[in-house]
Image (spheres, helix red, strand yellow):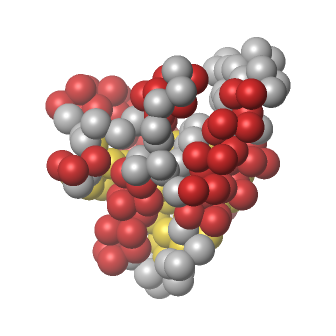
Amino acid sequence: MSTAICPGSFDPITLGHADVVRRARSMFDEVVVAVAHNASKRALLTPDERVSLAADALADLDGVRVVATSGLLVDLVRDVGASAVVKGLRSGADLDAEHAMALMNRHLSGVETVFVLGDPALAHVASSLVKDVARHGGRIEDMVTPAVAAAVRRALAAGGEDGR
């Protein structure tokens, strides 16, 4: 059985993320979506909220599970027996940002990173932009699931990225 990991902060998970996970699932028997907690970043949503929202957004996919992680990705790769890391790319800038991480993960564990080109219709969708649009009262319902949109709006109303 082949297993891949799709890591990210997913703050929040977007339809672009879900598209990459769906396509990864078509290539691997199992996909583990690893919701990373990075203490150096101020997240809008709590780690538990991000895990729950990702699980909800991907609930229709068999062979996909969502886990929280806070350590090195290569440790999770070993723990779940993954043969690859899958990352989505929207542009060359994404490749530039992911390149060094892919090489480091291979150096540390031998695991390869598979890059999946994002759906061009979703190339403009990024978690940071979703939060910014919502912060300014814009419509985000065509970029995230209804549950994610509601959670983002609740978090922003409660004070958002101010040390939640």
38 or 118: which is nearer to us?
118
102 or 90: which is nearer to us?
90
Q: Position of residue 164 (x, y in %)?
A: 81, 25
126 or 3: which is nearer to us?
126
Left or right: 143 with respect to 50? left
* Figure check: 44 above or below 120: above
Q: Report how many numbered discs are placed on residues in the image.
A: 0
Where residue 155 sits, quadrant-wise, is top right
Q: Position of residue 127 (x, y in %)?
A: 48, 35
Question: Residue placed at 35% from the left, 39% from the top?
Answer: 125
Q: Position of residue 51 (x, y in %)?
A: 69, 54
* Figure check: 130 above or below 69: above
65 or 11: which is nearer to us?
11
Question: Residue placed at 36% from the left, 61% from the top?
Answer: 19
**Residue 18, visible in the rendered structure:** yes
Question: Residue placed at 33% from the left, 77% from the top?
Answer: 26
* Figure check: 73 above or below 137: below
**Residue 112, visible in the rendered structure:** no
Q: Position of residue 16 (x, y in %)?
A: 37, 51
Left or right: 1 with respect to 57? left
Question: Residue placed at 32% from the left, 68% from the top?
Answer: 23
Left or right: 85 with respect to 163? left
